[in-house]
Amino acid sequence: MVESPAVDRRGAIDMLDLAPYATPHRIRTIEREAAALRLSWSGGLVSRFSHLWLRDNCACPICRHPDTMERRFLFIDALDLERPASYAPLAASLGADGALELLWPSTKLDARPHRSRFDPAWLRYHAPEEQRRRREAERSASWDATIAGRLPRITYDEMMQTDEGLARWLEALLDPGVVLMTGAPARDGEVQRVAERVQPPRWTNFGVVFDVVSMPKPVNSAYTPIGLEPHSDLPYYRRPGDYQLLFCVVNEAEGGDSILVDGFRAAERLRDEDADAFALLARTSVAFRYQDETTDFRAAAPTIETGRDGEPCAIRINNWTRGTLDLDPEASDALYRALGCFWRITRDPALQLRLKLNPGEMVAFRNDRVLHGRTPFDPASGRRRLQGCYIDSDQVLSKLRVIARHRPSPAA
């Protein structure tokens, strides 16, 4: 066991990681195990890191390119993975700056011992226990119609002119998965300008930006005045658009209220009311298809996708573009019944958030969680024109992480 010097500094070592990390805690002791190091921290946490993980995460210029910050240590060639004792550290100690210092044995690629230094705040951030705590803290709570009183809102100026405002908008997209923007100029193309704060909108079979208007020969049910059942968009893509932005240019018609339903809450309720139906929708892929004279998109996926913890993590439901259920009679009837149970739940007014979008307002939502629909409207009573587009979750998360670099680091 090695005792730590009574020094605690943050950012002692450049780990070639631009993400913020900080901790008020220091490593107090190191204990050697057969295949791991056991670190005891001030404050009581004990964390374990495998020798192989530590060797792979050395951030020195030999092991990581100092400009690209990418790995160049080839563990598959350097180490004998069948003999863990051959790459156990020769020595483990704590530097005067609180850094973890390791001396590694020679490898197949280098006859010299190798030294690594690890910043304690970076190690604390990546400790398995801290990762589990962070995941639990970030777990979303589902919502129902009562979210109307606490719906995240942001002004156009806040979002377009400040990174802090943009960050709050992005955070709301992640959880609860829906956010209202107000005060924008009610003009064509504004939805694209807003999207470009994150990325150029994703192209789909409806183009980069689509107009939601009633038209004489519609190619989609959205282009009619009929009511739309709560649904997810683009289910016939292997990867549908992650987030939809829906912007109001004009809304003078009677009716046409937007309907939003948390698909996770609906799925949770289905599980409570009919566990067999939930399980069937979680394990059975449903086909979807969109076709016109120039395109034929097809994809299949479960209605309710669950994560490793068994909780809903994605919803895909759309009656208009659902394909043919190519199953035997018993299996197809069981699936119809399960779909019907889920569908009826999404119709419950207690689960539906209803919004009448005004010109210059935009609702944005997570497409694989928040089901959207609308009440019927009368095109003869006035003009109604919304514009929409899609952006990707990878870009949302990337933008939020870059903004976070300039925010104060939450200490672990």
Image (cartoon, rainbow, N blue to C red):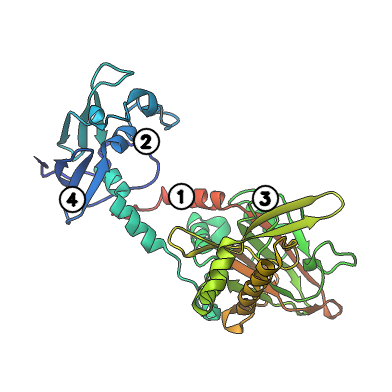
Which element is circle 2 on? loop
Going from the N terminus, do you reach mark 3 or mark 2 first?
Answer: 2
Decide which of 83, 264 is in the foreground and name it.
83
Picture quadrant where residue 55 is located = top left
Residue kind at label 1, given as amino acid type:
Arg
The span from disc 2 to disc 4 (Cα, nearest Å) is: 23 Å
Where does residue 364 sit, x and y in percent of width and height? 61, 64
Going from the N terminus, do you reach mark 4 or mark 1 first?
Answer: 4
Do residues under tags 1 and 3 come within 8 Å of each other at their CB atoms? no
Q: Split into 4 quadrants, where in the image is the N terminus?
A: top left
Circle 2 residue: 16
Circle 1 residue: 401
Q: Residue at x 52, y 70 (%)?
A: 152
- Badge 2 local density, few (<14 within 10 Å), some, or many (20+)? some
Circle 3 residue: 202
Decide which of 273, 183 is in the foreground and name it.
273
Where does residue 330 sit, x and y in percent of width and height? 67, 69
Going from the N terminus, do you reach mark 4 or mark 3 first?
Answer: 4
